[in-house]
């Protein structure tokens, strides 16, 4: 996809949704961090259903520690890998208090040092909480970037680097959200809704649906 085509691609997405954001529900940076950790191999909808009760009872690192691993499990058992995730949520709460005064750090290395936090989770927090122009590549973005020709890559890191190079700087801060939403609702895995797609004519995908 040519540079001018990439710019038009994002111009259309931006016009349709000028202020995109995550679909995860949260009331603080800490709650977003926990929600993103819980969202691994789970839908945002299922995470929101679980965290409404969790955050009502335990909205802070201190409260999560008081609740304990079994208390967290009681709220999130409908989510896949819930026991491991509960362990990570309690452990990262301890580390936030010990190392960062209970605050979510504005630093990639510090974020990735927390249990259950990898590069993608760190990127979501850096982008959504701190407005950093970074790219959190999930399965939706990976598929869309390769399918459309926007930023092909053999793995998520290659796609992330390609997007960081190719997305125009004035669109980079919100690009992560536009791409996730487009991949989630339009450029879906099995039956992409090409007939509803705003960027259909810009896309390199050969097998477009009617």
Image (cartoon, grey):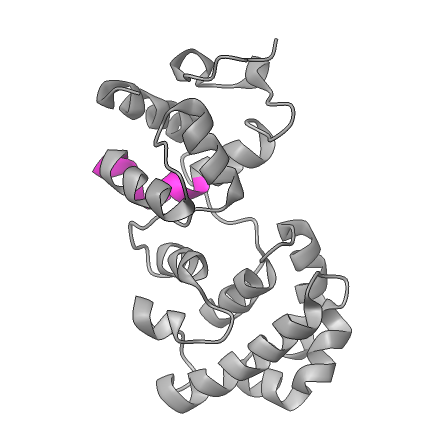
The main secondary structure of the magenta stretch is helix
For the point 38% across and 71% down, the residue is: 111
Q: Quadrant of residue 62?
A: bottom right
Q: Quadrant of residue 26?
A: bottom right
Residue 107 in sight here: no
Would you place residue 84 above or below residue 199 in this image?
A: below
For the point 44% across and 37% down, the residue is: 178
Q: State which region is magenta.
A: 167-177
Inspect the magenta stretch and tell me whether residue 172 lies in it: yes
Inspect the magenta stretch and tell me whether residue 143 lies in it: no
For the point 54% across and 65% down, the residue is: 37
Please state, as top left, top right, bottom left or bottom right, where the C terminus lies in the image: top right
Pick out the residue farthest to the top.
Answer: 210
- Image coordinates of residue 148 in percent, x first then y, are 43, 23
For the point 58% across and 82% down, the residue is: 90
Would you place residue 134 above or below residue 195 in this image?
A: below
- Image coordinates of residue 52 in percent, x first then y, are 68, 65
Would you place residue 88 above or below residue 193 in this image?
A: below
């Amino acid at each position: 996809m040519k540079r001018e085509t990439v710019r038009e691609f994002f111009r259309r997405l931006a016009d349709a949704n000028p202020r995109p954001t995550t679909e995860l529900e949260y009331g603080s940076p800490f709650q977003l961090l926990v929600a993103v950790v819980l969202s691994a191999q789970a839908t945002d909808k299922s995470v929101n259903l679980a965290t409404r009760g969790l955050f009502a009872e335990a909205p802070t690192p201190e409260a999560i520690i008081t609740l304990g691993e079994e208390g967290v499990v009681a709220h999130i058992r409908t989510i896949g890998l819930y026991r491991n995730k509960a362990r990570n949520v309690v452990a990262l709460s301890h580390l936030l208090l010990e190392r960062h005064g209970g605050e979510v750090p504005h630093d990639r290395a510090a974020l990735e040092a927390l249990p259950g936090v990898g590069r993608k989770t760190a990127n979501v927090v850096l982008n959504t909480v701190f407005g950093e122009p970074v790219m959190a590549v999930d399965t939706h973005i990976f598929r869309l970037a390769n399918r459309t020709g926007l930023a092909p890559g053999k793995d998520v890191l290659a796609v992330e680097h390609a997007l960081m190079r190719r997305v125009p700087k004035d669109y980079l801060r919100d690009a992560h959200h536009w791409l996730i939403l487009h991949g989630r609702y339009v450029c879906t895995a099995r039956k992409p809704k090409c007939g509803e797609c705003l960027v259909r004519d810009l896309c390199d995908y050969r097998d477009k649906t009617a």
